[in-house]
Amino acid sequence: MLKYLIFGISISFISWIVGMIINSILVKTEYYKKISNLNFIESKSLNKTIGIDYFKWIVKNSFFKFFNQKIKLKNKKTELTEIRKEMTIAEISHLIGFIFVTFFAVYKSITHDFLFGLIIMIANILMNLYPSLLQQENKRRIDKLINRQIKL
């Protein structure tokens, strides 16, 4: 079972690279504009129920906070639209990674062991889906700030 977990974490890390590569190609297309405003969970209470607040705390208080420094508010003069753009890149890269790992999980569930696929999916959810959902929540907050700036 430990090797299943190690494989799940490893393939999820690899999926980050796959996501970034595919995203760098997608960003140059018209399709990218359509997927830049994804919003899977609009409800704050549902986000709270599935544990996005806990996940946010873990990201802010662990080594993960050093991963993407481009999406950090450094001061009040920080360009919010640029931060939103970087959040979108991170969000879509994680979604691509999620889809990539999901194929592996289904394949391993069918060819090896259901438990193997399940453990891969748990790692995938924690390392790809939750970061994407967190970016969507953060983008909603950034959008409110951008709209306030526009009104001023």
Image (spheres, rainbow, N blue to C red):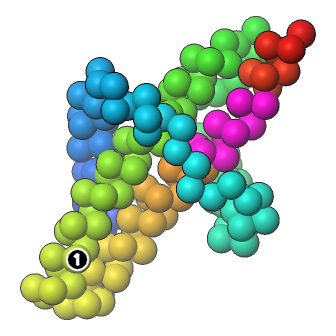
Residue at the location (27% across, 80% down)? 117
Q: Is residue 20 visible?
A: yes
Side of 146 relative to 152 (left or right): left
Residue nearest the viewer, comparing 64 with 44: 44
Q: x%, y% of residue 82?
A: 57, 17
Q: x%, y% of residue 24?
A: 28, 27
Compared with 73, 58 (above or below) is below
Q: Amino acid at mark 1?
A: Val
Q: Is residue 38 magenta?
A: no
Residue at the location (21% across, 67% down)? 103
Figure quadrant of the C terminus: top right
Residue at the location (22% across, 77% down)? 106
Label 1: few (<14), some (14–19) or many (≥20) C-alpha neighbours in 10 Å: some
- Magenta stretch prevailing secondary structure: helix
Compared with 128, 75 (above or below) is above
Side of 20 relative to 148 (left or right): left
Magenta part of the chain: 135-144
Q: Which residue is mark 1?
A: 106
Q: Secondary structure at mark 1?
A: helix
Q: x%, y% of residue 84?
A: 59, 26
Figure quadrant of the N terminus: bottom left
- Res. 148 image quadrant: top right
